[in-house]
Image (cartoon, grey):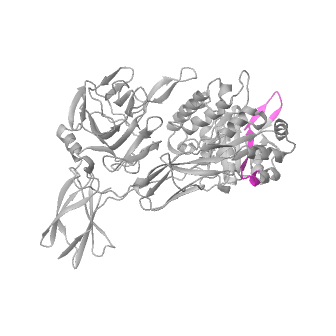
Amino acid sequence: MKTAFAVGCSLAPLILVSAHAGAGLANGVDPNHLGQGDWIWEIPACQNALGVSTPQAVIDYEAGKGMQWICVKAGDGVNEWSQWNAAIINEAHAEGMKIFAWVYIYGNYTNATSGFNSSEAAELNVAKWALSVGGDGLIIDAESEYEGQAAAAAAYASGIKAAYPSRFLAYAPFSYISYHPAFPYVQFGTYCDAVMPQDYWADLGISVPSMVHDMDAEWSAWQNGLTGTATNAIKPIIPIGQGWNSSGYAEPVSDITNFVYRLKNDPLPAGRGGYHGVSYWSCQHHTVADWNGMAASLILAGTTNLTVPQGSNATFALNLPSGGAYRYQWKFNGADIPGATNSSCSLFNVRSAEAGAYSALVTNPSGCALSYSALLSVVSPLTNAPGSVLSPPSLANWWPADGSGGDIFVGGGDAQQNATYYAPGEVRQSLHFDGAASYLKTGLPELSPPWTVCLWVNRQNAPGASAALFSDTSTNVLKLEQYNGTRKVGVTILGVADYTFNYTAPLNTWTHLALVDNGASIQLYADGVLQGAVPVSFPLPRDYIGLDTFSTSDAIGARKGRTFTDYLLGSLDEILLFHRALSASEIAAIHSAGGAGLVCAPEFTGVAPRDRQLELFLRGQTGKSFSLYSSADLANWTLLETVANPTGALTVTNVIDPGPPQSFYRLSQP
């Protein structure tokens, strides 16, 4: 009997990329990368404000200020506005800009004093007319009149989308959802491709930082509260900023640039994937400071995060307005890439070492702007290093940080990365945190005691008051540095106390840490040696890795918001969470494996022929079942059996040989 074995390897993690809102929209409109735009209300008033004499000159002025899109008022209630026409559309397109119609709507509304009447059906006809004229889409301005009109909102928005399914559709509502509980956010959002909240900070009486913070809090809370089909209303967020002086407020350039800076560098944006667009109200109201601020803070229609298999190709590209005389320099983890000076950056046959942050410095004769960074994740086949050891049982999560934020033990635990990049680790690669904006978000709930956290850390002195390892919106935090004085490892129960271990992780050195909650106390092990315990026990927070989040009063009234601080500076590798308290010997074994790490891929470790039967010796990820396949030709495979694997290694006996002349066997785990 001849028997051949195909060395087993786990399938690369399946990356599910849901089609983003607006996929396949006409004229290449991408709601996730709309860039910077402007609102035009009354064209004659814009001409007067800009000192020009024609509508086309208004469009030319907008293009000269670097606008990537504009929207022009096309209707008010049941009335069509003639300033929306083919000539204005063609002029915008000639300048390389997208152009959208916008309409103010009232729904089924009657004003008894003025005699004004409107209906959803009549306003729908205006919207259809506007799109029949041309342009790249429509923006709906619905405000107080639409509160309590959920049915009308659904009928209106769905009617537009049914008539023009591939045309971009957005709505521009109030920014504070909690103040307008009767407004039909879900009905509009379900049929629109983007939402444009009106972030008018000065009119609301708050600062720019408070405006961005409040938008994050309001829209995150709303999104997290949606269930079922209502989650279809979650769309890219493209804020509208204040672009005019108001009572007691003369807008400085710094408010515009600060607004854009905070949108680009928001540590926890409500917009899924961040904020990739902005606009301002409105052209006829802009001051010189507004125009200067917008020109200085051009938001690029930037790059998108990519996840690719090892050995494939990847391309990052920018799509800027035409005629800008741009010069490009692409960067990898902040360092220039030699020769990468085009509007796109292509990588071929990518390896895991090329995973990281890509960005582009774009300059033109009037200034420069840094594009959004995009993260390249590279999914590599799982392999076992010589000397790797079996994981203890009861794994909950495993983030190896090898070119992606994937959890290789369970589905649903993949971490969203913000401003992290990959660096050499203790076991292959690691994730580096910059101490200013980096973190991982897993979306996972707490783990009840008992639990264990194991990970390799390479610490640098964080710039904040402390440096967090794990946190969520509860009161519990695990700290790599409890205070910036002693920098000892600790845990915190917010509002109760800080607790410290008498241990500080060394600087710039890979160190294995394990925190064990046995239900009565939390113990700390460093490089396999017990360092002490603190007399507390609590559920393990695991939603955020690398920052602290705690409750605070925000800038409006007494509502509670979240503050994100205490960012980690350094690198983390092989992050393991367990559903139980590991023993000292189990922790020591993980540490002793060092750079070999744990067994992560299923493999055959031996075979023993038994007449026409076999004994197969297997090992793989502890707690995951094995699926054993056989084949006579390496093309057609038959599942022989699926066996449980509670300890990581086992022997399968009585395997029936499928017959001559030879047999092949393959092993996999989920």
Quarter of the rendering containing residue 255 = top right
Q: Which residues are magenta?
A: 92-116
- Residue 155 makes an appearance in the image: no
Of the 4 image quadrants, the one containing the N terminus is bottom left
Q: At which x and y percent is residue 95?
A: 75, 52
Whether residue 619 is situated above or below residue 142 in the rendered picture: below
Quarter of the rendering containing residue 574 = top left
User: Residue 432 magenta-drawn?
Assistant: no
What residue is drawn where x is 29% and y is 56%?
601
Find the residue positioned furthest to the right.
53
- Depth check: give the residue in front, 285 or 542: 285
**In the image, 212: left or right of 375?**
right
- Depth check: give the residue in front, 416 or 322: 322
Whether residue 277 is situated above or below residue 463 in the rendered picture: below
- Residue 524 makes an appearance in the image: yes
Q: At which x and y percent is residue 202?
A: 67, 26
User: Residue 100 magenta-drawn?
Assistant: yes
Q: At which x and y percent is residue 78?
A: 79, 42
